[in-house]
Amino acid sequence: MGTPALAARILERLVMAPGANFRVVGVVTRPDQPRGRGLGTEPSAVGALAAHRGIPTLKPVKIRTPEFLSELKAFAPDLLVVAAYGRILPASILDVARIAPMNVHASLLPRHRGAAPIEAAILAGDAETGVTIMRMVERMDAGPMYLQRSIPIESSDTQGTLKQKLAELGAAAMLEAIDLAARGALVETPQDEAIATYTAQVEKKDAAIDWTASAVQIERMTRAYDPWPVARTRLGGDEVLIWRAAVEDPRSSGHDPGTIVSMKPNPVVQCGTGRLRLLEVQAAGRKRISAADFLRGKRVEASARFGT
């Protein structure tokens, strides 16, 4: 059960696992959605892969119905393997699995429960992240854990690069957990509720840069929101997307937040605390280009301000 590309990669690894002691008998994913300029409906990443592999697929609009429950039970699953499906599953569905309903969550639980664990880990400046394989319960990412695997967060990691890494890590961890289930060797470890943290679904408005924040925090935004919704600001009334930036100085002050304090070789912007060097930006409807070329093309000079 899954929807986006991260879940599709995990499904692909399960289907292609050499010498597997299991088989994927069915897939559940979100309904096809309007996409592209023509707004024709297209399947989710998981739905497209399942169709390519010829795996029976359910795409329920509503999951709390007798009809869907009956269709799910017809698969007679030993395990439910869930990865970023996008809905809270009721007990009636979780109980369909003969052995366990297992979820792969892209964080080291109980830290960063919820819908945006990868973005949250970057924004928090975490040194590492990882995946948790857990038994699902009706509370958000609160079930007992079967195993965890971790990786460092590199200074260059974005939401996009971490999703790719965690998809591979999650697939390997899920294969390991499935093998443990087949051998009756799963061991549950309760989560520590006292240290649980939560994330919310990311919205476009979350990516609006507040230049009174620190340079460190704004730089994290550029990575956490790449490739979506992309950190953004305004310059002279026009929206500008900030794709890449680097902390020039984490402590300096002396100018109003958002002020361009120097232009060469790359523009440097004063933040609430520290300064940020802009490397790659994009104007609405244009291509991504170097920040220096962008500002030179708009004839922007030092002392201009972002955010106005």
Image (cartoon, grey):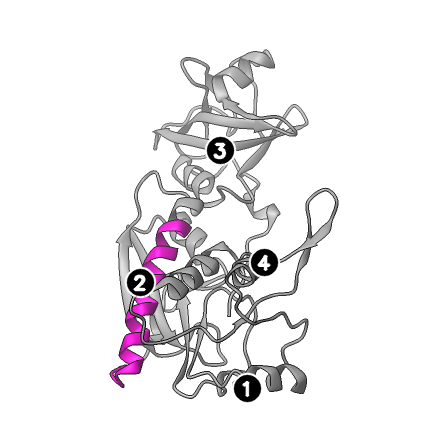
Q: Earlier in the sequence, mark 4 or mark 2?
A: 4
Q: Which residue is mark 4?
A: 44
- The type of residue carrying mark 1 is Lys
Q: Which residue is mark 3?
A: 243
Q: Are marks 1 and 3 in contact (CB under 8 Å)?
A: no
Label 3 CA crowd tier, 10 Å (few <14, some 14–19, many 20+): many
Q: Which residue is mark 2?
A: 172
Q: Is residue 170 magenta?
A: yes
Question: Could you tell me what secondary structure mostly forms the magenta stretch?
Answer: helix
Write the residue at 31% across / 81% down. Answer: 181
- The type of residue carrying mark 2 is Ala
Q: Are marks 4 and 2 in contact (CB under 8 Å)?
A: no
SS at circle 2: helix
Q: Earlier in the sequence, mark 1 or mark 2?
A: 1
Q: Is residue 114 left or right of residue 173?
A: right
Label 1 CA crowd tier, 10 Å (few <14, some 14–19, many 20+): few
Q: Which residue is mark 1?
A: 73
Residue sitting nearer the eye, 148 or 239: 148
* Label 1, label 4: how far apart the Cα atoms are: 23 Å
| Residue range corresponding to the magenta coloring | 163-189
Q: How many marks?
A: 4
- The location of residue 186, given as percent across then percent down, is 28, 81
SS at circle 1: helix
- The location of residue 52, given as percent across then percent down, is 53, 59
Write the residue at 68% across / 27% down. Answer: 237
SS at circle 4: loop
